[in-house]
Image: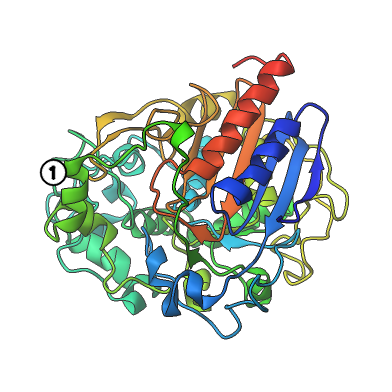
Amino acid sequence: MVDVQGTVADGFEPVRDAFVRNFAERGDLGAAVTVHRHGRKVVDLWGGTRSAPRARGGPGGRAAAGAAGRVEGRPGDAGDGPAGAPWEAGTAVVVRSATKGVAAAVPHLLHQRGTLDLDAPVGTYWPEFKAQGKERVLVRQLLSHRAGLPVLDRPLTPAEALDGASGPAAMTAQAPAWEPGTTHGYHAQTYSWLLGELVLRVTGRTLGRWLAEEVTGPLGLDLWLGTPPAAEPRIAPLTGIAAPPRPAAAGLRVRAKQHVADAWRDPGSLTRRAFGAVEPLPDENDPAYHAAELAASGGVATARALSRFYAALIGDLEEEPPGAGAGVGAGADAAAGGVGAAPAARCLFTPATLAQARAQESHGPDRVLLVGTRFGLGYMLHDASSPMLGPGSFGHPGRGGSLAFADPDTGTAFAYVTNGMQQSVTSDPRPQALVRALRTALRDLGATG
C-alpha cells in the first residue's frame, strides 16, 4: 500500500479517500493534491514515488510523449530499487498544459493595470506579427485560441523551441490556418511563443521573469516558468504509465471517437500538426526544458503552489507558516524543499478581472482537439470535455494528468500534479475522481456552487 502523507481539514476526508484509491485503482505513480477554501489550505496530501524503474516506460520513457514533448531519462531517474524514491512534501513536477492557466494570469493583470488592451490588435505591441495577413488578429483572439495559429508549416527543432527567438520568429512568418476570430482550435504549443513574445513586447520582461517578480516571488510559491538550477533536485521526472483496465462494475469504457483517432494518426491533420509543432519532441526531463519559459507546457510546480496561486486569483490568502505549504519562492534557496513561510496576501484579481477571466470566449467544436471545448481568455472553462468543480470554474488541465483551477462560487482552489503520464488530454480519471470527492465534501458542508 502507498504511504500517503499530509493533512485534511474536517469534512474533506472524501478527498483523502479518493487520493488513496488513485494509487490502488487508477495506477498513480507519484502525486500530490492541495485544496484551498477561502484562502485557507484544507487539503494537502502527497504520496507514491518520485521515479519508477525503467521497465515502467522503457528506456527513454517514450510512452509518455505528450503535448509538449517526450520524456527521457536522466542519471538516477530510474529510482532507488523497484519502488523508486518517495514523493516528498516539496516535490515539484512539470505540469505541461496546466502551465497555460498560470501564464494567462499575466495578460489579465497587465490589462488590470492598464498596460495591455485585450481588444487591440497583437501587432500594436508586436509590429512584425502583422505579416501573412495577421494584422487584424486581436489579443483577445490569441488568448482564446481563435487566432488560427495552432500549427507551423515548418516545425521547430527542440533547440529552436527553447531558444526564445526562433518560436516568435516562426509565428511572425506563419499564416493563419483559418480566418482569425471565426472559430477556435487549441494552440497546444504555439501558445508559448505567442503569449511569451506579447508579454515581452508589452513589459520589456520575459513572461517567466514578470511572473516571478510580480506574483510567484511575492507569494512565496514553488512555481516557476523558467526553473532555477537550484530547484532541479526537487523535480520528479515524468514517466509514461499505462492506465489500469477499468473493472466491469465501472460500466462502459469511454473510447476516443473514430475521427479523433484518425486525426491523431494523420500527419497532415491540424491535430497532429498542432501537437507536433516541435519535431522531434523535446525532452521534458531535461533541465534545459525546465529553464525555458514555455508558457504552453513548461511550468514546474508543486500542488501546494498551484492551488495557492489560484486561491490568490479569487480571494485573500491566509499566512501559511514554515512547512505548511509555503514555498521558497523566486528569491530564496530553491533547494530548501519548500519550508519557508508564505505571507498573507490580498486578492490578485479585481472583481472585473475575475469576471473577465471566466467569461466564455470560445465554445463548441474545437478544430484541433475535435471535441467540444470551452475557453475564456487563456483559461479552459468547466465543460463536459474538461470538468472542474462547477459552471463558474476556470483553470487548465495538463495532458497526462495534472489539473488546477479556481471556483469563485465556492471560494475553492484545487491542484493535482503527478509524474505518471497516462494517455489523457483534457480529462484524466485521477484528478476527476478527486474533483468528484471534493464536490461531495463541499455539498455535505453546505457550500453552494
Place residue 67 in its image quadrant.
Answer: bottom left
Q: Position of residue 417 (x, y in %)?
A: 59, 52
Image side of residue 292 versus residue 445, left or right: left
Place residue 68 in its image quadrant.
Answer: bottom left
Q: Position of residue 295 (x, y in %)?
A: 44, 57
Give the amino acid at mark 1. Trp
Q: Position of residue 103 (x, y in %)?
A: 49, 50
Most foreground residue, 18 or 180:
18
Image side of residue 3 versus residue 421, left or right: right
Vertical placement of residue 366 versus 149, above or below = above
Q: Residue furthest bottom?
A: 75
Q: Position of residue 119 (x, y in %)?
A: 33, 34
Q: Residue at x 23, y 43 (%)?
A: 137
Q: Is residue 221 visible?
A: no
Q: Residue at x 42, y 74 (%)?
A: 283
Check disc 1: other Cα within 10 Å, few if <14, some if 14-19, many if 20+.
some
Q: Which residue is mark 1?
A: 178
Place residue 194 in its image quadrant.
Answer: bottom left
Vertical placement of residue 416 versus 205, above or below = above
What secondary structure is found at the residue carrying circle 1? loop
Q: Residue at x 18, y 57 (%)?
A: 265
Q: Residue at x 47, y 42 (%)?
A: 396
Most foreground residue, 56 or 417:
56
